[in-house]
Image (cartoon, helix red, strand yellow):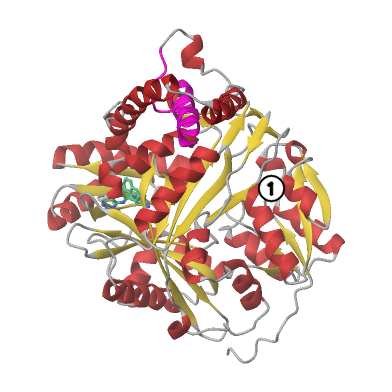
């Protein structure tokens, strides 16, 4: 069965995506001598991925539905440009089984799993049945869609409250609700089912036992078409807000070598049972006793893949291209070694002082961090306008160091260097997280960020700001020539940063939250510059 697959050569790749991930894929292709074709919507005419690709084709208007989601146009452009393969990146059509099939039918290699494998894992009830067959532990509960509220009551009584009611076609937290009693279940069942019907076109819902204070830990894997599948360690993704990851790291502080091996081998079993090929990620919930439960499988290259690349020294996109050509994986499980610690911050054009409201607009100044152990996967440049049509992620900042503490401190240093003018960003918000005692002690679960935000304001950051303010007064009094120069440098930095837009909350007369970002955060960074010399 495997031997029948002929080797295919990929000489040109169409990148069916935009922004930083499109550029990431173009870079990998360039390194391998593979030509690249970019596609763009009207909003992305001047995007970085268009600039760096060998060729570029317009898809249509700015809306995703009329551009990056037009599978027919993408296949048409691939055929016209002579591309052998399409890399979907993440989001858009990356987990669309019909699109993967359509590529195959058009004789184009889809760089990812087959449509069939995607379907086997796409429905959460199917995936849970597959997990049972493969001996993969999953959260207790039903593996079939519930037929009636009466059945729901029986199943819930069996597993015990509290339970989670989830949509089979959902995922990433969509169509999910916690139910703590029979009377609540009576009320929730019908609404959950009709909401799922409207949102996903399927009203199928099922029940799971609620796991309290879980961590979200996922296993990266890659499989070839010859039956080889290896795991590349885990990523700790518990720092999330509204089911959007904010910080990811590798390895997880709670995963021992032994637990990693058990979770990794479990993930590989599931992938092999699904006939999975290419890169994929198996998500687990890990409870306070470090039991792990399969949650769902992501059948794409994920946003946070760089932290795995840093600690394994592997290039996941290179490996994806290799196995997409039908070649065997060039390494086995024994060749995978983890080294050091990597942390990723997702830099967004959003305003933490205004409920994380998106802040599209023109980037008037961009000074990016660098130096030892810093990697930045960025899709923007100075003078470019962040469109309002897509997810406003600007960049992924990754810090790599020998230990977790050193990686956190290196990230703080890099965030200090980062200047974005013209739009609001969440850059200073990361300081609060990285300085938080619980975060530094790796006491994080999926409720961590909500708890931090509920504190309203920073114990640690406001305290640090106050302490530094006092230090500054003494510093200024004894200022010599060297200090004057240093202070001028700090002033310039502050001036650059003041190009950042005023917050809507400030315009309304409400005081910005101290220390979180904005005024105080910027000044804190500038003061630190001044004190350093
Ligand atoms: C759960 C859970 C607790 N118990 N399932 C949210 C995203 C989706 N993939 C599954 N999610 C959860 N499922 C049971 N049985 C808690 C969550 C959850 C969560 C999971 C991962 C990351 C962040 C989360 C935030 C809130 C809830």
Q: Quadrant of residue 115?
A: bottom right
- Tell me, yes or no, if residue 201 can be seen here: no
281 drawn magenta: no
Look at 68% across and 78% down and name the residue there. 325
Q: Residue furthest top?
A: 509
Q: Quadrant of the N terminus?
A: bottom right
Tell me the residue at 14%/48% (across/down).
161
162 relative to 364, above or below: below
Residue at (51% x, 18% y) in the render:
503
Q: Under 8 Å from ligand 1: the CB of mark 1? A: no
The 10 Å Cα crowd at callout 1, few under 14, some 14 to 19, many 20 or more, is many
For image coordinates 52% across by 31% down, the residue present is 350
Closest to the observer, 451 or 139: 451
Comparing 101 with 212, the one in front is 212
The image shows residue 266, relative to residue 490, as above or below, that is: below
Nearer-the-camera pick, 48 or 3: 48
Tag 1 residue: 68
**Image coordinates for residue 522, horizontal then vertical, percent:** 49, 27
Magenta residues (range): 511-533
Which residue ends up furthest to the bottom in the rendered image? Answer: 3
Where residue 396 appears, as percent x and y from the top left, is 54, 48
Q: Residue 213 in the image: state x and y as whole percent.
A: 22, 49
From the image, give the main secondary structure of the stretch colored magenta.
helix
Where disc 1 sits, the SS reads: loop
526 inside magenta stretch: yes
- Of residues 381 and 186, the one drawn nearer to the viewer in this rendering: 381
Q: Is residue 415 visible?
A: yes
The number of numbered discs placed on residues in the rendered structure image is: 1
In this rendering, the answer to whether 144 lies above or below 504 is: below
Task: Locate residue 99, reporting x and y percent.
Answer: 65, 60
């Amino acid at each position: 069965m495997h031997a029948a697959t002929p080797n295919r050569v990929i000489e040109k790749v169409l990148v069916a995506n935009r922004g930083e991930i499109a550029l990431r894929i173009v870079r990998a292709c360039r390194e391998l001598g593979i030509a690249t074709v970019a596609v763009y919507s009207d909003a992305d005419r001047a995007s970085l991925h268009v600039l760096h690709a060998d060729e570029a084709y317009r898809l249509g208007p700015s809306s995703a539905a009329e551009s990056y989601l037009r599978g027919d146009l993408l296949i048409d452009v691939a055929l016209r440009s002579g591309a052998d393969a399409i890399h979907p990146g993440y989001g858009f059509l990356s987990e669309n089984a019909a699109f993967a099939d359509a590529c195959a039918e058009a004789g184009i290699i889809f760089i990812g799993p087959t449509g069939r494998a995607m379907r086997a894992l796409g429905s959460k009830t199917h995936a849970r049945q597959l997990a049972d067959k493969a001996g993969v532990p999953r959260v207790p509960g039903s593996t079939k869609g519930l037929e009636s509220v009466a059945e729901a009551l029986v199943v819930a009584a069996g597993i015990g409250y509290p339970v989670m009611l989830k949509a089979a076609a959902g995922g990433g937290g969509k169509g999910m609700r916690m139910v703590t009693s029979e009377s609540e279940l009576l009320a929730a069942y019908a609404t959950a089912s009709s909401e799922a019907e409207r949102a996903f076109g399927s009203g199928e819902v099922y029940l799971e036992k609620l796991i309290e204070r879980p961590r979200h830990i996922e296993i990266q894997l890659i499989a070839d078409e010859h039956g080889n599948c290896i795991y590349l360690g885990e990523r700790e993704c518990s720092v999330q807000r509204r089911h959007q990851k904010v910080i990811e790291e590798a390895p997880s502080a709670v995963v021992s070598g032994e637990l990693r091996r058990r979770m990794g081998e479990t993930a590989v079993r599931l992938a092999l049972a699904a006939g999975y090929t290419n890169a994929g990620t198996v998500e687990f919930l890990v409870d306070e006793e470090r039991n792990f439960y399969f949650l769902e499988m992501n059948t794409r290259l994920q946003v946070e893949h760089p932290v795995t690349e840093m600690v394994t020294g592997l290039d996941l996109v290179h490996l994806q291209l290799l196995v997409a050509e039908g070649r065997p994986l060039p390494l086995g499980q024994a060749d995978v070694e983890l080294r050091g610690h990597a942390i990723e911050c997702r830099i967004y054009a959003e305003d933490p002082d205004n409920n994380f409201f998106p802040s599209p607009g023109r980037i008037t100044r961009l000074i990016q961090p660098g130096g030892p152990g810093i990697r930045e996967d960025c899709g923007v440049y100075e003078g470019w306008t962040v469109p309002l049509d897509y997810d406003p992620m600007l960049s992924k900042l990754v810090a790599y160091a020998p230990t977790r503490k050193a990686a956190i401190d290196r990230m703080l240093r890099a965030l200090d260097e980062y200047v974005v003018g013209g739009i609001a960003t969440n850059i200073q918000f990361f300081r609060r997280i990285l300085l938080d005692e619980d975060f530094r002690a790796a006491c994080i679960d999926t409720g961590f960020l909500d708890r931090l935000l509920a504190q309203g304001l920073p114990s640690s950051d406001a305290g640090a700001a106050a302490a530094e303010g006092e230090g500054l007064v003494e510093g200024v009094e004894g200022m010599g020539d060297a200090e004057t120069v240093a202070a001028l440098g700090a002033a310039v930095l502050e001036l650059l940063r003041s190009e950042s837009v005023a917050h809507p909350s400030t315009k309304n007369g409400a005081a910005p939250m101290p220390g979180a970002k904005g005024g105080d955060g910027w000044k804190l960074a500038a003061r630190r510059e001044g004190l350093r010399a």
